[in-house]
Each structure stands twice: as structure tokens, then as C-alpha cells.
Amino acid sequence: MATIGELGEFGLIERLTARLPRGARVPLGPGDDAAVIAAPDGRVVATTDLLVEGRHFRRDWSGPYDIGRKAAAQNLADVAAMGARPTALLVGFAAPPDTGAEWADGLYAGLADECEAAGASVAGGDVVAAPEITLAITALGDLGGGAPLTRAGARPGDAVAVRGRLGFASAGLELLTAGRDGPAEVIAAHRRPEPPYEAGPQARELGATALLDVSDGLLQDLAHIAGASGVRIDVESAAVPVAAVLGPDGLRHALTGGEDHAFAGTFPAAAILPPSWTRIGAVARGTGVRVDGRVPEGGGWDHFRM
Ligand SMILES: Nc1ncnc2c1ncn2[C@@H]1O[C@H](COP(=O)(O)OP(=O)(O)O)[C@@H](O)[C@H]1O
Ligand SMILES: Cc1ncc(C[n+]2csc(CCOP(=O)(O)OP(=O)(O)O)c2C)c(N)n1
Ligand SMILES: [Mg+2]
Ligand SMILES: [Mg+2]
Ligand SMILES: [Mg+2]
């Protein structure tokens, strides 16, 4: 079995890109100095997230396919969180030369499948040798002529609602960290988030005033909406969906765990939300986030404070 070092830079690129499906939104994909992405809206949503081995994933916890799915999902969810539809990914891939070519194949199969789930494709990237695996991914998206859903539009009186899983990836990470066995569903959620991408454009149609994806923890991420909008967000803990499979610490996982890439937004109080959205609180005058009237103790991911 070949390593990527044996394939060489251009052999690796050829191998990885030959297997990528051709994207409908990408008239010119990998192979030239740059890709060309269709932008019918005239504006492009652009976002980038880095994933570093040991920080975002471990190769002894996750296989290459799931790491690819997760890396794509983390970026595609940010596009959806603007109320947009993802169109393309650009993938910076750094890896040690002794990485198996099949590992890289698995990674790219995961990237391609997650893109497909979101309506996007891999349009290009870069490969370099490095001591650890790092993925630097840029995702692009299309607003379809609508206004971007920012973090800054929440108004006092709005309802706060979420769509997607909360606390699953966090509960899974805790089990893996402790070396304990637990529900397969929860461990799988750490390895492979399943963001409901449709929630982005849907939230815009429902009249959302602000939206984001929950990457670092629900309360910490809601605080970004509160800060950007100049409002206070009041969360009612009893209304937060806590799956029984999360165990006795389910509420903590749901409030402070990240990486499920659920969507949290604010909507006019009178908005009629479909059952996929759960109301968990309301927007008020003031600052910060409160849970059941109290300032929460913290929790949530900070890369430089772990
Ligand atoms: N190194 C950087 N240079 C410029 N902008 C950055 C940098 N890091 C983060 N940002 C910007 O700060 C904002 C918040 O980043 P982040 O918390 O990572 O958002 P998210 O959780 O949605 O990925 C984003 O708009 C991002 O583009
Ligand atoms: C090995 C490992 N340790 C810890 C974590 C937990 N973790 C890493 S990054 C992160 C937060 C989300 O990632 P970030 O880079 O902050 O993405 P962004 O908020 O920019 O979307 C969490 C909860 C993990 N996924 N894997
Ligand atoms: Mg980010
Ligand atoms: Mg985000
Ligand atoms: Mg973060």
C-alpha cells in the first residue's frame, strides 16, 4: 500500500481529484491555477475553519472518512448559518509523508459525501507535507438573492429557537476522553456531525432576525448573537431539547457542548415555526445570556483557554 510520500505531491493531487464528483456550481474545478465558481447571486458567502490533528480530531478515535465528513460539515454549516446554500469547498491538506494513500482516499470520500449532502463540491485546494495532519478549508455559498442572516439582527421580544442535535458530540467526546464505552449514537456524533443544512435557508424564509451554527456551545454561541445585536438572550433550561441518550449530564452537554452544528436563531415572536425548530427562550433588552434568570457559569470551547 502506497504512502502519500511515495505518490508525491502531484501524484497525490491527481489521485484525490480524479475521484471527486464534478460540482454543478463549479464550471472549472481542480486542475488550473484557480477554480471558477458560479455565483448567480452576484455576492459570495465565504468562510474558513482550520482543523488540526489532536485538537479537532484524533486518528485513533476517528477514521479518515468521518474526519472528512466532519471537516466539511464544520465549514458548510457556517455557510448555511448565513441563510445561504453551500456551493464549493477549497481544501488545504497538510499531512506527514508516511500517511497511507488509502487514508487520504478515505478523507476525500468523506469530504465529497458531506459536500453532496449540502449541495456543494470540492473545487480545489492545496497539499503540503507537515508533521501533523491539518485541514484548512474554505467554504463558499450562495444567498439566492436574499439578505444574509447575520448575528446582529435580534430584537427584544424575538423568540429564540434551535434546530439540530445539541450535546451529542460533547457527550461522545467525554466518553472517548475517559476511555469509556457508551451509546454508539453519541460516539458517532463526535466523529461525524449531521448539521441540518436546510435550516439556514429555512430560517430566512421563516423571517429569522439572526442565526448561527452552534460550534463552541449553545450558551457561548448565543452570547455572540446577544453581543452583535446589543440584546440579552434569556434561555429557559426546561425548554432546551435534551436527548435521554446523553445521560445524567445531558443538560450540561446541550448548553455547553459544541460541534453538533445545530442552528440557533431568533425569530419574530409571532413567527409560526415548524416542529423541526424548538423554542428555547426569548430576546430582551440588556446584555449577555441568562439561563432561568441567572448568568451561567461558563463552559463552551475556547482554543486558547483549554
Ligand atoms: N485569523 C482571523 N482573521 C480574520 N478574521 C478571523 C480570524 N479568526 C476568526 N475570524 C473571524 O471572526 C469571526 C468569528 O470566528 P469563529 O468564532 O471561528 O466563527 P465560527 O464559530 O462561526 O467559525 C468570523 O467572522 C471569522 O471570519
Ligand atoms: C481530540 C479532540 N479534542 C477536543 C475536541 C473538542 N473541540 C475541538 S474544537 C471544538 C470547538 C469547535 O471548533 P472550532 O475550531 O472552534 O470551530 P468554529 O467555532 O470556528 O466553527 C471542540 C468542542 C475535539 N473535537 N477533538
Ligand atoms: Mg471558525
Ligand atoms: Mg459558525
Ligand atoms: Mg470556535
Image (spheres, rainbow, N blue to C red):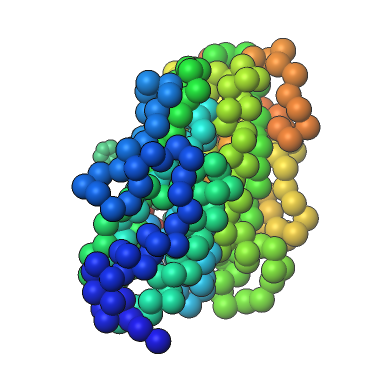
- Residue 275 point in image, percent of width and height: 78, 32
Q: Nearer the viewer, residue 198 or 13?
A: 13
Q: The C terminus appears in which quarter of the rendering?
A: bottom left
Camera sees residue 130:
no
User: At 58% from the left edge and 22% from the top edge, which residue is drawn?
Assistant: 204
50 shown above or below 127 = above
Residue drawn where x is 32% and y is 65% of the image: 14
Residue 253 x/y as whole percent: 61, 53
Q: Position of residue 164 (x, y in %)?
A: 65, 43
Residue at screen point 66% across, 76% down: 181
Q: Name the image quarter holding the N terminus.
A: bottom left
Q: In the image, 104: left or right of 219? A: left
Residue 96: image location, x then y, percent: 28, 75
Query: Could you say which is closer to the camera, residue 239 or residue 272?
Result: 272
> In the image, ligand 2 is in what quadrant?
bottom left
Q: Nearer the viewer, residue 15 or 224?
A: 15
> In front: 231, or 163?
163
